[in-house]
Amino acid sequence: MTLESTLTGPMESQPESLRRFARSRRFDLLMALLVFGGLCLIPLVVSDVYIMNVVILTILFAFAAQSWNILGGYCGQVSLGHGLYFGLGAYVTFVLLSKFSVSPWIGIPAGGLLSALLAYAISWPFARMKGHYYTIATIVVAEAALVLITNWEFVGGALGIQLPYGPDSWATLQFGRNKNPYFYVALSLAMSAWLICWFIEDSRAGYWWRAVTSNPEAAQSLGVNVLRSKMAASAVSSALTAVAGGIYGLFVSYIDPSSVMGFQISLLIALPSVLGGIGTLWGPALGALILIPIGEVTRSYAGGTGSGLNLAIYGVLLLGISLLRPEGLVSLFRMPRKRARSARG
């Protein structure tokens, strides 16, 4: 009996369950094509610069949350230190561009590769930790990196790095006035991350990672290399998160340690998946659609008097979801489909 057959249930129930699973995957892919196709039209109907900035940030953090979901959702390793990789991607891109005139088309993949190697190395000792011990360890490493970057003069220290203004160009991915190119870049990345997760769900690695999440001991008894699975998931997740950090830095044209590597960034990466639904395809996007606009609106209209108001709102939302919908907001959309299947039955 293969690992896939073990995870999908008894042998006699496989045919119907597999057919239902295949239909669900086709439905998700069709919905993704419709959703992303519809989103491509947003620049044609939205002319307000502020609204477009909020839309771009929402899509960008949906991409970062989907990247976090690979590790936290599918592999069960809850990290609150992904701001380390987000910031690392931004700093590698900025340093290469500002000091060595290296194109972001090279700098962004370089940041992703460096983050993947760092995550792979860090996860070797950390993957043996379980539950809150692993989460605390990720916070400690991210905070240590924040202190290091803050005191490293070569990368600007606490003052950060300001990109020199130049003409709008795809070569440098700098667009000062028209932000629509950033929208399409962020949307392309978000769709790529969604497709990666869609393939993971029906791949050998996806079955292994979900087995590790459910019961590491049972997975290991079935031949799954638990340690290597966690390390691989960490590397893929951190690489994609670093790409999000590089694009974010270019979008805002200025970075400093707290703005791209602080603990609040780690929360903004993890919370959308928690709110929307951990280990689901649509949960991170749904959570980002709610959390990111709330943060931007409170910061814009409340100003200094509303400092921390967005965190209070996040806390209330998470408390309500944990009590009413522990599976996340995405479970609200599954109920009609379940009722329809019951009615057909």
Image (cartoon, helix red, strand yellow):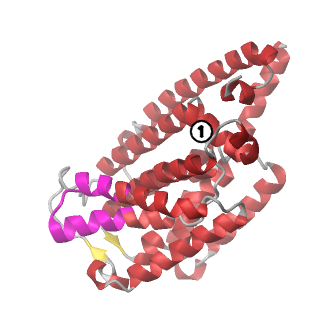
Q: Residue at x 65, y 71 (%)?
A: 136
Highlighted range, magenta:
89-112
Task: Tally the numbered discs.
Answer: 1
Question: Residue 189 appears at what percent x and percent y?
Answer: 40, 44
Task: Indicate left or right for 54 with 21 as reference.
Answer: left
* Whether residue 290 is visible: no
Residue type, numbered disc 1 = Leu
Front position in the image: 7 or 56: 7
Left or right: 150 in relation to 343:
left
User: Which quadrant of the figure contains the N terminus?
Assistant: top right
Which quadrant of the view contains residue 316? bottom right
Magenta highlight: main SS: helix
Q: Is residue 37 above or below residue 53?
A: above
Measured along the vertical axis of the image, is residue 243 above or below residue 22? below
Quadrant in which the C terminus is drawn? top right
Kind of element beneath mark 1 = loop
Residue 86, by quadrant, is bottom left
Residue receiving disc 1: 281
Q: Nearer the viewer, residue 14 or 20?
A: 14
Residue 212 sits inside the magenta stretch: no
| Apparent side of residue 8 relative to residue 95 in the rendered image (left or right) | right
Q: Is residue 147 above or below residue 113?
A: below
Foreground: 338 or 109?
A: 109
Residue 99 lies in the magenta-colored region: yes
Provide residue 215's location: percent of width, then percent of height.
Answer: 75, 45
Identify the residue shown where x is 50% and y is 79%.
Answer: 144
Instruction: State whether residue 156 appears in this view.
Output: yes
Report x, y in % for residue 66. Answer: 53, 47
Q: Give the residue displayed 59% in from the left and 33% down from the top.
A: 201
CA neighbours of label 1 inside 10 A, class few (<14), some (14 to 19), many (20+): many
Residue 298: image x %, image y %? 57, 69
